[in-house]
Amino acid sequence: MFPSHSRIQQLQSGFQDDAILFLPELVICCGIVLLLLCRLVKALDRTHLGGVAAVLLAVALVPAAFQFSSPGEATPYFSGMLAADSFASLVRVLILAAALITVVATLLTGIPDRDDSGDFYVLLLGGTLGMMLMASANHLMMAFIAIEMASVPSYAMAGFLKGKRKGSEAALKYVVFGAGASGVMLYGISLLAGTFGTGQLPNLASAIAARLEVSNGLDPLVLTGLAMLFVGFGFKLSAVPFHFWCPDVFEGAAAEVGGFLSVASKTAAVALTLRVLQTLQVGAVNMIASPDTPFLLPSTIGIAVGVVGAITVTFGNLAAFSQSNVKRMLAYSTIAHAGYMLLGVAAMTIASTSAVLYYLVAYLLMNLGAFAVVALVRNKTGSEEIAAFRGLVGKSPVLAVTMSLFLFSLLGFPPLAGFAGKFQVFEAVYEAGRGATDAGHSALGTAFYVLLAVGALNTAISAYYYLRIVRAMLLEDAASPAACSICPSATLFLTLLAALLFAAGIIVNPIASATTQAARTFLASKDRAGIPPLPGPSKEPAGKAPAGAKAKAKGKGKGKGKGPAI
């Protein structure tokens, strides 16, 4: 029941190495304590702490970026509860960057005020810490704890604005939906861990793969447990049918909070979903030596995720048509973009994982930029309706031009980063469909082609509501003659985000190389098990196990020998 003396010594001996791997999170933890202590010092009691929060996030970015730039072998730490690898390192960098950009935006817009700044930034750093743990979670219980650590501060941030009824209502809805999703997810975790006797993702993946092989991928107990698990993931992703909280929360919360939740929270949720699915895929290939193995999970779990993604992207785009509030419109846009990402997640290949990570990089820049413009317009006009954006180009060309660029990138207009990210996701889905068709799984290939068509069609549909805002800013007369000029710092901030969007869309290779390196974390774990990556025509005859496979060949595969790199 209690750890033995030798086990305690083992934990103590490895603590120093674990603490180094955990350094970015430790900086955030120390930062939370520091911000709380600042309120105990009389001289700092009424000081705005946004600058302190920005410095803390910048300091945490340094070890996170260093760990990604010098990748080593994927290493579980803290008794295997967390995983240190290129994938987690990249996602942590994205989450910290999103938090830092959010803090800079709040300093420019003045929300929160000086009195509430300490509380607000403690909540923001607390949510950031939970999201970073989501990216590194290597155990189902750690995944649950991390999601709760990310969610609870988010509930408070959604209702942080004082005296705003919509904000309080948004926070209450967020809490109620979040509690329900967490309960269902916890039932799924208990079902899976209780059935297989482990919550460690690699061990669980091997056990699930062995069970799915016997049932041809349709084991009711396993699929029920995974479905309940993905309810929690779907809530954080705001995927249909777990999206109901998103529009109300984004409308009621401050635009700065909405931008942070739409980017950082979604990045963490996508990362956790990718880690679980890719670990399951690797576990299947390690356990089952058959040419059909790479298609076992995509043909069941993958297609289910893809269908949810197709419904999500369609609903999000169609629901955005009738919105007059820009924050609410961007909330439905967030739902739609979650659908695009899920289309890539469904392919369950290394290429699709890399594409989704690239998409997250672009999404960080364009969505935070769009919400920052909304916040600045709100400060000048007191409104977040589309009417407040009419004739904006005449009152503030910087706001109008940069907002147009952010919206064009969200639409997927070249040469912006949004186009590069969306193109890579679509290409990965197409290649997954072609690989399945060439390997004799024509039904799976057709399904991927249908998902690709749904994504492409929705890209065209989304042009209506994005261009609706652009038209109001550039072609319509101003609703009021009041000036809408912004300070030089805000101009520099928005210009920098827009320039990064252009750079990420034109100079694709550095970011693509980084995302591919992160995605290959899962491929490396398979290589260490002796399983070849199967990127092209197989050299093994059907029914013969690849060299080094852990399980004996089953002889069931009738594929034509070509499969995706999983």
Image (cartoon, grey):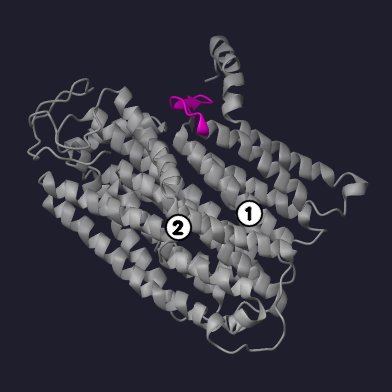
Q: Quadrant of residue 146?
A: top right
**Res 136 seen here:** no
Q: Nearer the viewer, residue 20 or 284?
A: 20
| Residue 100 % position (x, y) | 64, 50
Verify whether residue 74 appears in magenta: yes
Q: Residues within 10 Å of mark 2 (few under 14, many from 20)?
A: many
The boundaries of the magenta stretch are 69-82
| Residue 189 % position (x, y) | 42, 41
Q: Are marks 2 and 1 in contact (CB under 8 Å)?
A: no
Residue drawn 32% across the image and 37% down it: 280
Which residue is under mark 2? 417
Left or right: 152, with 163 as reference point: left
Which residue is under mark 1? 101
* Amino acid marked by disc 2: Ala
Q: Main secondary structure of the magenta part?
A: loop
Q: Nearer the viewer, residue 539 or 228?
A: 539
Distance in Å between CA atoms under marks 2 and 1: 17 Å
**Res 559 seen here:** yes
